[in-house]
Image (spheres, grey):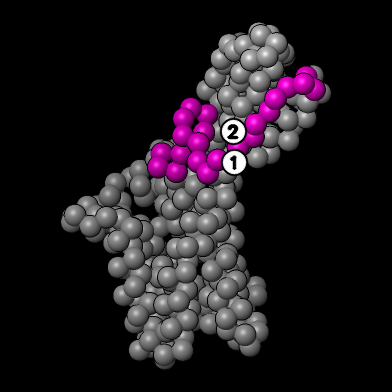
Amino acid sequence: MKHDKYSLNRIIENRNKKLIHHDPMTKTKRYFLMSFAAIFMAFGTHFFKYPNSFVIGGVEGMSIIASMFVPLSRPLITLIINVTLLVVSFLILGKSFTLRTGYVAILNSLTALLLDKICPLSGTLTDNTMLELFFTLIISSMGSAILFNIAASSGGTDIIAMIFKKYSNLEVGKALLMVDSIFTIGSIYVFGMEIGLFSIFGLLIKGVFVDIIISSMKQAKMFIIITSMTEEVGNFIKSELNRSATVIDAKGLYLKKDLTVFISATSNVEAPRFRAFIKKIDPKAFITILNTSNVVGKGWYQTDELTND
């Protein structure tokens, strides 16, 4: 009983700690998003990238080219390359980076391998190569954006890029582009000019897609509220939204009435609820709602924040 009581107290303690610090990304949620991204990207690879031989960088691109010279399936080659790179990563880049990337890389490879067993494809889904390239880019870009947004990685050529960065002055982004470009350009000699050009086009456009999707994920709402209901609005922000705000004492220009200005950032999901509450308790409140592309500070998860979870 004493042990049970201690465990319960610890759970409550951890919950209160998260409420105080407003931890926006729990370990469970982070792993759920990592798992979703890995499986989602594997579906895109299996149904669109592999059948069309799109070499849009990454380990999948390496395996597509390698499959023309090695009697192994593309998903199996991808798994072998990923495991090899993870071993190299562990020796050169350390345990933390390897564990952070290894989970996604292995889950992605195993999912693609499973799909190849239970749903083998003998050709492309359609005869429209551009349409399939579009779906390849959308799926891979969404997966990459989710991972980048939670400071995770799918491994693969990211590992090679990090090794380049460690032993040279080359930035990670440039190193990654250089590594991916080598295999993408090489696809021209292996699969011909048409597939090669589709692959080069895909590699160039993917970066744009990832930036657009990440920007949409980062969007939030900035509220500037002028109200006389100070306690009610403050309590709602703290207790219901689990957010914070900057509170400024103010005075109306015409009636000289004492007012309070709240400046608070909320997610897009929280914004309608917050707006409805304010209008309900104070119909005369003046509300300005601004769209923001990025919020930096306590209570907001940052993509450049490396976690060791």
Mark yes or no: residue 5 visible: no
Q: Amino acid at mark 2?
A: Met
Q: Which residue is mark 2?
A: 222
* Left or right of 62 on screen, residue 75: right
Q: Which residue is mark 1?
A: 291
Say if 298 sits above or below 99 in the image.
above
Quarter in which the N terminus is drawn:
top right
Residue drawn at (62%, 11%) of the image: 251
* Left or right of 164 on screen, residue 143: right
Disc 2 to disc 1, how far (Cα)? 6 Å
Badge 2 marks a residue whose secondary structure is strand
Residue drawn at (45%, 43%) of the image: 303
Badge 1 marks a residue whose secondary structure is strand
Residue 286 magenta-highlighted: yes
Residue 88 magenta-highlighted: no
Q: Amino acid at mark 1?
A: Asn
What is the magenta segment's predominant secondary structure?
Answer: loop
Q: Which contiguous range is marked in magenta?
A: 282-305
Mark yes or no: residue 294 visible: yes
- Where residue 130 sits: x, y (%)? 57, 81
Say if 142 sits above or below 224 in the image.
below
Nearest the eye: 222 or 176: 222
Q: Disc count in the image?
A: 2
- Where residue 4 sits: x, y (%)? 63, 16
